[in-house]
Image (cartoon, helix red, strand yellow):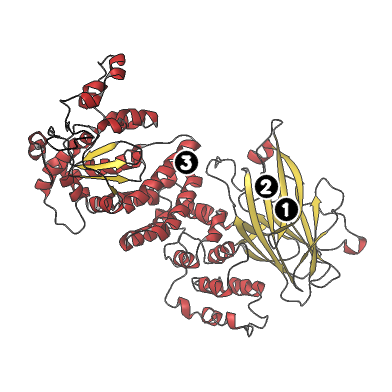
Amino acid sequence: SSRFRPGACFFLSTSTQRGAQHGEMLLPRGRREQPQKDAQWKEGSTKMYREIYQETGSGDFGIQIAGGPLFRCHTHILERSGGFIGKVRQFGKVLPREVDSYALPSTKEYFKEHGLFHLLGDLQAIQFSQPVERSALQNPLQKLQSNHNDDANRPGYSTAHFIGGTTCAMKRVDPFFLAERYKVECDCERMAELLRFVYQGQMSFFDVVPRTDREKEVLTHKMLNICIDAETYSVDRLYEKLLHWFGHQCYNIVGEKCFADSFYHLQHFEISVTEEFSRQLLVKTVTGDMLATREQFRAVTRDPRWSSLPVEFVEDTLSFDGMPISSETEVLSLIERWNANADKKKDHIIRLLCCFRPSEETKQTFYTWLVNMGWLLPDGSLPDVPELQGLRKVMSGSHSKGKKPRHNLHHRDIYQDTGWEDEDSDGANDVTFVHYKGTTPVASGCSFSLGAQQRLVQADPIRTSGLQRMRVLLSNPRADLWNPEHEIFVGLSYGEGKYFGYLCSATAFSGIFSVRALASAAPAPNAPAHLTGSGNKVEFDLLLEVQVQRANMVVLCKLSVIFANLTVTEEHFQISFETLFQGAGLSYQVIGTGLGDDEVDVQLAWVGGGGPSEEVDPTIHGFDGEVTPLPTPKQSPDNSSDGR
């Protein structure tokens, strides 16, 4: 029932070369290309795009936006775009083919009312397609007094009335009668952009350059929604182009925060995808392209939502050969972050441990990690627990047979999008902590054996406001019970002789530990707060909250101890704005006291946050390698020679 007007067939004799550049995007999947013929057709469809907004357009396929205007599309063009026209028929509600233009909102007025000013450029000469009653040259008073139902010359006019019905009624021909008309529940702006891509192979959202945070959020929201619409309505070429944008351009355009939001929205969108081909393409983009560079990888894994991802998705991510990590020990840290709330099943954690590829350098770190988890006995044997039986395959190394450990940060292609030249320094900073003996750095990573006159220092100081949550695990597997003389300071340093944190030590009761707030400005530690551990191990989280500077250029900070997702204690302290942004910043430090010849195993992992944001000037937050020892707190005489 389609019809074509003679005047609408001009597209068959237009340019060939320029149409071929766009025509390829509209070819349905599996169809052989016919360059010259398709170029002519594509050039015509590009010019006919603006006709869909005209009330007197030649389109025969009506797409009625719910509560919005009518788009008069062309069946022969939509059919060449793949499955778009079929999805409109599937999801749309069938409406009468006769259109009463007075009952629908004017396209131009609707765009103005809803702030879609960038679409007004497509409404060229639209006033000439309006009835005379809506003409801009008409007297406003005559517009109000006129009754369009009395116009016997209007298209589709009928003499039918209520009493006589259509018997012997005369009806004028309606040249704007549609072959099909459907009502769709879709945003008007996004449907207009979908149709622009179908007709022209372009979408205006790709040309937007946001400058403010609000503009970045709006663009991210639009790109996510139109990606969903493109998959729903089977505009496959646009769907592929949008996923490519999210994987390669999104981070540089909208920034770290909006990129992380895009990642987790797309990951959640996987369960709503309507086609298996689209789902596979989405998973490939989310687990591959969006995690290909170090910056993007850090933005995703340091987000608190990392712990909400399903185990299947995390397993696919950690199994990726090109994962941008400096060492396999980072896999253990990522698993620790995923289990930030300690609510994951043991078999799921063991399933993720199969992604760890041990080497001679990381094997001891892996064993220490298992000992701290209580899954490996000091003699190297596994406890007789059914849930840990799958760990034997991990211990034997059969799961990683033939797979080389990953050290991908030295590859230059990981940094080609950021322009960084010093790959090794970034890899060290992201490892987060450096192990010092005296003033000499000896190791870096997240798992250490801490002895006397040694300290662990955060490699990259914190200089931005926000929340940083770090998990701390202290253990001494070489002894059955924690030595009461061993005290571990875990806190923050913000300049020479300036520190704030907590002293952790064992109490007289086995398995009960105390934490006491200790500050450089205080003469002695505060009263203790208590938390539960085991005989030789304790685990808790430190939550640092850095607020925005106040009018007096003072930054208020809060450091809390969290155990089993409950706040055990919290203390406030203040630093100057100059210290945070231009001075020493805030750096986590771990120092042991009273250790003597003994050592304490320390394992650190970022649960949320960690590391500076992209707005920080890289020239003022580098780590110069100098570490200022914390002053020794007042000790009793019997602890004066504690080997600090």
Residue 137, percent across and down? Answer: 25, 15
Where is residue 392? Give x, y as percent. Answer: 55, 82
3D distance between C-alphas at marks 2 and 1? 8 Å
Q: Nearer the viewer, residue 368 or 187?
A: 187
The residue at the far bottom in this view is 384
> What percent of the width, then of the height, locates residue 584?
67, 43
Q: Amino acid at mark 3?
A: Glu
Instruction: Please give the label number shown on residue 217.
Output: 3
Label 1 residue SS:
strand
Tell me the distance, in whole angstroms, between the alpha carbons under discs 3 and 1. 31 Å
Tell me if I can see residue 336 in this picture: yes
Please identify the quarter of the rendering in which residue 463 is found: top right
Residue identifier under label 1: 560
SS of the residue at dot 3?
helix
- Sequence-earlier tag: 3 or 1: 3
The residue at the point 22 percent across, 48 percent down is 25
Residue that badge 2 annotates: 545
**250 horizontally vs 382: left or right:** left
Question: Residue at 42% of width from left, 60% of height from top?
Answer: 271
- Choose mark 3 or mark 2, whichever is in front: 3
